[in-house]
Structures are given as C-alpha cells and as structure tokens.
Amino acid sequence: MSRPFDIGLETLTGQPLLSGNVARQGVGAGQRGTFFLETFGCQMNDHDSEKVAGVLLSRGYRQVEKPEAASLILYNTCSIREKAAQKVFSRLGEYRDKQAEGKIIGVLGCVAQQEGEDIFTRAPWVSLVCGSASYSKLPEMIAQLEAGNHRVTGLDTDTDETFETDVTRRDNPWRAYLTIIEGCDKACSYCVVPYTRGPERSRASDSILREVRQLADLGYSEVQLLGQTVNSYADPTARRMRFSELLLAVAEVEGIRRVRFTTSHPSDFTRDIVEAIESQPKLCDHVHLPVQSGSTRVLRAMQRTYSREEYLEKIAMIRNASRPIAITTDVIVGFPGETESEFEETLSLLSEVKYHNLFSFKYSPRPNTPSLAMRDMIPEEEKGRRLAVLQERQREIQTVQHATLVGETFEVLVSGKSRRENQWFGYSTSHRVINFTSQATELLGTYVQVHVTGAGPNNLVGEHAA
Ligand code: 5AD
Ligand code: SF4
C-alpha cells in the first residue's frame, strides 16, 4: 500500500537538488504535477513502486498521499492470486469520473501485463497500461502522455533489460530493497510470474555494488536483495560473480550491517550460499525457501523441479550450518488433484522441518497457467478447511519454538514505536518480530540488544537490555 511521503530528492540521491542527474532533467520537484501511487502485492512490487516514484520525482512530479490531490493516479498491481487482481478493478471503478477532471489514470505491474489493452475496454478512463518488464520505458511513456497522447502501453516481455533508475524513492529509511534479478525462468504450473514478469534477467554485479555503496552513504545499514528466484542470479558481466560471492561482496561494503535476500528457489540453493552465511555474520541467519507442498506427486504436478526428499536434503544442509539459520516457507493448499493424504504429507513436512514462519495460500487458478486446465479442482470450502488445519499446525509449532527463546538476547533493528508508552518493535537478524519496552526516547533505526521475556505464536516480547 502507498505510504506517506516526506523525503526530499536530496535525501534520495545524496546530492543537492541542482546537481547531477536530477538537474539534467531540468525540472524542480512539483513543477510537472502530482502523482498518487498505490501498490498491491509482494516486495518486488513495492520496490518497483519505489523505482517508479523515483523516475517521476526526477521528472519534476511531486508525490501526494491522496488520489484526489493528484494529476496522475497509478496502481501498481499484483495478479499472483485472484483476489489481488480483483482489487485493482474495484479501485479503478472508484476513479471512473476522475478522467473527466483531467486526471491521468494508469495501471502498472502484473495485472497490466496480464490484461493488456483489455483494461482500456473494461475501464476506458485508464490511459496508461504498463507491465513490469517495460518499466525502463516509463519515462518515454510519461512523455507521450504529457504530449497529449491518451493511450499508451508497455507490454513487451521479451526484453533483456532490467529496470534501473538514477533515483529511487525508498519507503523504509533503514532497510533498502534492491532487485538483482527480474522475471523468472522456472515454469511452476500454477504461477503467472513467468508470464507477467517475463524471462529471468540478472543485473550487472558492478551496478548492484555501486548502488549498495550509495545506499550505505545515504545511511542505510540493511539491504535486502530481491528476485523471484534470487539465488538463480547469473552475473551478466565478465566477472561472472556467483550469487554467494555477490552476497559476500555486498556484506563487505562499509556501513552495511545486515544483508538479506529473498526468495530462494530450492533447486538453485547450493552449499556455497550456506558457507557464505557461515563465514560472514553480516549475512542474516534467515532463508526463505518456499516448498509449496510436502507431496512429491503434487510437486511434480506443480513442476517444482524437486521431490520432497530433495527438498529435505536442502533443509538438512542449512540445518547443518555452523550457526543456526531460521527457515521460512510458502505453501499452497488445494492444488488440483491434491488428495487428503497428499495434504497430510504437507502437514508432516511442517512437523519435520519446524519452520520459523509460514506463508500459506489457497490454490488460485490464474490465467495462462498450465494448472488451469488440470482436472479435479478442489472446492473452495475444502481449500479453506485445509488452510485452517495447516495454519493451526504451524501455530502450534511456532508456540513451542518461541517458548524456547525466552531468556535469550537478540540484536534488534528498531523499526517502529507502538502507541503505548515505552513500547517499540524491531527485527532480529533471523527476521523474528520482537516487541519490547525501553525507557529510551529515540531508538528508531538503531540496533539494540533485547532480552526476551515472553513469547506468543506470532512474536516475542522483551526488554531493552541496556
Ligand atoms: N495460487 C495460490 N498461491 C500462489 N502462489 C503463487 N501462485 C499461486 C497461485 N496460483 C504463492 C506461492 C508463492 C507465493 C509468492 O505465492 O506460494 O511462493
Ligand atoms: Fe512463480 Fe515458480 Fe517462478 Fe516462483 S519460481 S516466480 S512460483 S514460476
């Protein structure tokens, strides 16, 4: 979702407003108009929006918090599950009359890619439709709109470009997201991503490292490297850096204290990544490794490229590391044809692995995906039941696991303050949420030691250990 915005261009670029790239555009902030940008979806989408906002800011637009105050209204959308895709159309419906007021309305992201020009038919008040693989052409497209063109589209997916911007407006002042690989070359049978985001494109390692150095200079201490299959990273430059080498190089940048990465694909999760985490404490002790199902038969139907046993071998490799590494996962329940006993295999996998957190979803049939044509769709009600059973099992696991952490002390990056007095929250390196009390007056963005005094299924509570 869009967040309030109060960072100036100087802060974003680390440069005074009238120098460098921004000055070359020849416009000052707010000169061109105002934009409202709302985002639905995953971290990749959030970060794409940060880059889109950067492009608009450097072209002289000013960001506003309400669509009513904007001359350009943009929705960056997710279509990974049906619910998210529907939300965009209901939002667009709300802005039906705005075009008449001279506002430009645009749809970006996966729904844009998926629905293409049909969006103009369904919502004729929309002027811009642009999928994520075409974002590098956004400045051009915006220029066309400014020149009076009423309909512009960017829907290519056969690009070999990645979306790099001179200016990125980041929402989180401490953790910077950085896309290192776009698109996806896997072909999971339920997933729209290869279709909406196009083929895999890795960003040059020198460009990534340059941006990390800039981020550190701007005061960011935590970076999170992003990609749908982040560990499939293949450096296109002559250096041919492996993903694990890139992780180590990012961690070595002065000022960087924590490095995260998500999402990893189990098939490309290799021993050298574990070794990098073992050798470099700045690499966070957390791996998100979606399993999707605990049944080899279902995994084959999902085209996940590994069996239950192969996945468990990866888990064993991570668990054998010289320092503990937290593991989280994604699971889909009710994939077409999933039997009760196959679902139970997923439950038994949860009990075996004991994930530190789980993101679970009911299977959602998506356009253009092979699983759409599969037989034996599971009724909604049954999917809902399986989801509830799965979540209850995970809740039990987390309750037991969290209880064992009482008495331990964690380093926490303080990320927020609760409305209650002296109450703060932050994240441990293993990405556990810890709510804690402290008498200190200003802690946001700092690293503090927190002593855990209590635990629930979803978080830990503690006290600032001076
Ligand atoms: N239905 C349900 N969940 C899905 N995901 C991806 N596609 C679908 C779908 N069609 C889930 C997967 C993935 C996460 C980001 O979203 O679990 O890892
Ligand atoms: Fe989708 Fe599979 Fe690619 Fe992940 S790896 S984005 S689930 S196709």
Image: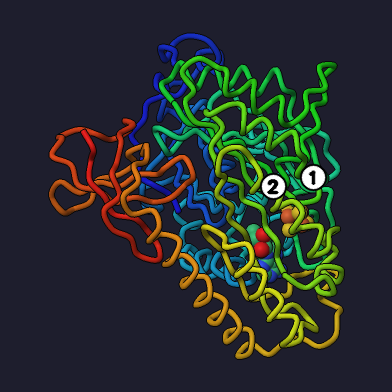
Estimate the spatial distance between the alpha carbons at disc 2 and disc 1, rounded to whole Å: 8 Å
Residue that numbered label 1 is attached to:
268
Q: Which mark is residue 199?
A: none
Quadrant for ligand 2 reads bottom right
Circle 1: residue type = Asp
Circle 2: residue type = Ser
Residue contact between numbered discs 2 and 1, judged by CB atoms under 8 Å: yes
Where's the N terminus, which quadrant?
bottom left
Q: How packed is label 1: few (under 14 Cα within 10 Å), some, or many (20 or more)?
A: some
Report the residue at 79% width, 27% height from top. 235
Visible residue check, residue 152 = no
Report the residue at 67% width, 76% height from top. 333
x and y, in percent, of residue 99 in the image? 51, 56
Tell me where residue 313 sits by quadrant: bottom right
Secondary structure under tag 1 reads helix
Visible residue check, residue 57 = yes
Residue that numbered label 2 is attached to:
264
Report the residue at 37% width, 26% height from top. 8
Rendered view: 95 above or below 270: below
Q: How many marks?
A: 2
Secondary structure under tag 2 reads loop
